[in-house]
Amino acid sequence: MGYYVKVEPDVKIYVEDLNEEGEKTIVFLHGWPGSHKLFEYQFNVLPKMGFRCIGIDQRGFGDSDKPFNGYDYDRLSDDVRKVIEVLNLDEFTLVGHSTGGAIAVRYMARHKEHGVSKLVLCAAAAPSLIRRPNFPYGLPKESVIDIIKGTYSDRPKMLKGFGDIFFYKHISEAFSEWFFQLGLQAAGWSTAETANTWLGEEMLFSDLEKITVPTLILHGIHDQVCLFQLAEAQKQRISNSKLIPFNESGHGLFYDEKEKFNKVLAQFVNL
């Protein structure tokens, strides 16, 4: 079932809620520039296994409202908190992919792990998507600047190029077009402003160290967007964490190795 949650007087967030009667709840935060639909191949399977699956479209993306402002991690994590409160969720597993992983990390620190019993970070953009003086493992700053310039000059071309590096395994032309259309659902300004957030001072080193719940880190070793060293940095800073490499995956590990992804996620939630 799909519905909207008002997070600000003029901003509504779209929520997809499957198998509301499920005994255990998993909340999914998607990556840039997609929507909850990126988790289609999880939502096809996990509800059949008895899980309640909730997908949240971030503001500016998917079916959510697309205001001109509000794309920093604080505001985005506050949006998640509002959804959690309205749905009255507790003891759920929070799953964040890519930028959704960064939002999940900020949520855990800013909102003191409210309602979360377990955390899953998959190809998460934390502690920093770009290289910093104290963190040489991210993307070059120039790569993100090129994404922003491409967004403002030829967003379809930029999205096509991003899709080319997203997956490690071969995807069909039809699947590539599907992925492309998910990116086009976003607004141009939200696409660019989220990328601008990566460039700013939105570093998550101290946030990671505040996480106390059991945490599963899933990361493709061939990831060209969030390099594997980011997962190792997450493992180092989150005390109660386990890292599982995905040897045949790039950034889109939830599709590159979807059977493995679904299996390890279900096992972790059921522990």
Image: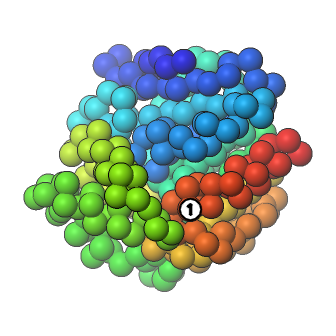
Q: Residues within 10 Å of mark 1 (few under 14, many from 20)?
A: many
Tell me the quadrant of the picture where the C terminus can be found.
Answer: top right
Name the residue rendered at 36%, 29% in the picture: 63
Give the residue drawn at x 44%, y 34%. 57
Which residue is more in the foreground, 251 or 191?
Answer: 251
Q: Is residue 20 left or right of residue 192?
A: right
Q: Which residue is mark 1?
A: 256
80 left or right of 240 in image:
left
Relative depth, front residue between 23 and 193: 23
| Residue 256 in view in this figure | yes
Residue 45 at x, y percent in the picture:
67, 38
Determine if residue 85 is in view.
no
Q: Residue furthest left?
A: 153
Residue 39 at what x, y percent from top left?
A: 54, 43
In the depicted structure, whether residue 173 falls above or below residue 229: above
Amino acid type, label 1:
Asp
